[in-house]
Amino acid sequence: MGGGEVLVHEGEGGAALSFQIDALDDLERLCREAGVEVEIVDETYGRTALISAPDGPRVWVNERQRDFYGYERLADAASV
């Protein structure tokens, strides 16, 4: 399914985790095949998979951003 990122940032009450992956559609398919409830939400910055957890809050997995509001990564811009 490819790689991804786990980001740690300051959250309410302590550290919060944010997951980012490239293949959100594959993640959704794998969850459904395993019988895990998943909801895909289309937000202004990309899509998010909300995955149900048995004994806790839902896990949020963001699709890796590709559009940075018209900006490009420096490495991408240098190749133009």
Image (spheres, grey):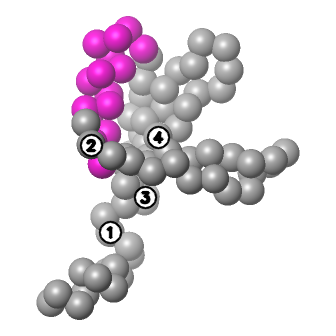
x and y, in percent, of residue 77 in the image: 25, 87
Q: Is residue 7 above or below residue 36?
A: below
In the rendered structure, are the residues bearing label 1 and label 4 in contact, judged by CB atoms less than 8 Å apart? no
> Mark 1 highlights which residue?
67
Residue 19 is labelled as: none
Q: Secondary structure at mark 1?
A: loop
- Of residues 64 and 38, which is closer to you in this image? 64
Q: Is residue 45 rendered magenta in the image?
A: no
Gap in angstroms between the C-alphas marked 3 and 4? 15 Å
The picture quadrant where one finds residue 38 is: top left
Tag 3: amino acid: Thr
Give the residue pinned by disc 3: 44
Counting other residues with Cα less than 10 Å from the Cα at mark 2, is it few (<14), some (14-19), or many (20 or more)? few
Does 12 appear above or below 55? below
Which kind of residue does numbered mark 4 sit on?
Val
Q: Amino acid at mark 1?
A: Asp
Residue 43 is situated, as x and y percent measured from the top left of the image, at 43, 51
What stretch of residues is rendered in magenta?
22-36
Nearer-N-terminus badge (2/1): 2
Give the alpha-carbon distance from disc 2 to disc 3, as whole Å: 24 Å
Report the mark closest to the observer, 2 or 4. Answer: 2
Query: Which numbered disc covers residue 61?
Result: 4
Give the main secondary structure, helix, strand or loop, of the magenta stretch: helix
Marking on residue 2? 2
Q: Residue furthest right?
A: 13
Q: Earlier in the sequence, mark 2 or mark 3?
A: 2
User: Mark 2 or mark 3, which is nearer to you?
Assistant: 2
| Residue 70 point in image, percent of width and height | 33, 80
**Sequence-wise first label, 1 or 4:** 4
Residue 55 appears in which quarter of the rendering?
A: top right
Question: For the point 48% across and 26% down, which residue is it?
Answer: 51
Say which of marks 1 and 4 sits in front: 4
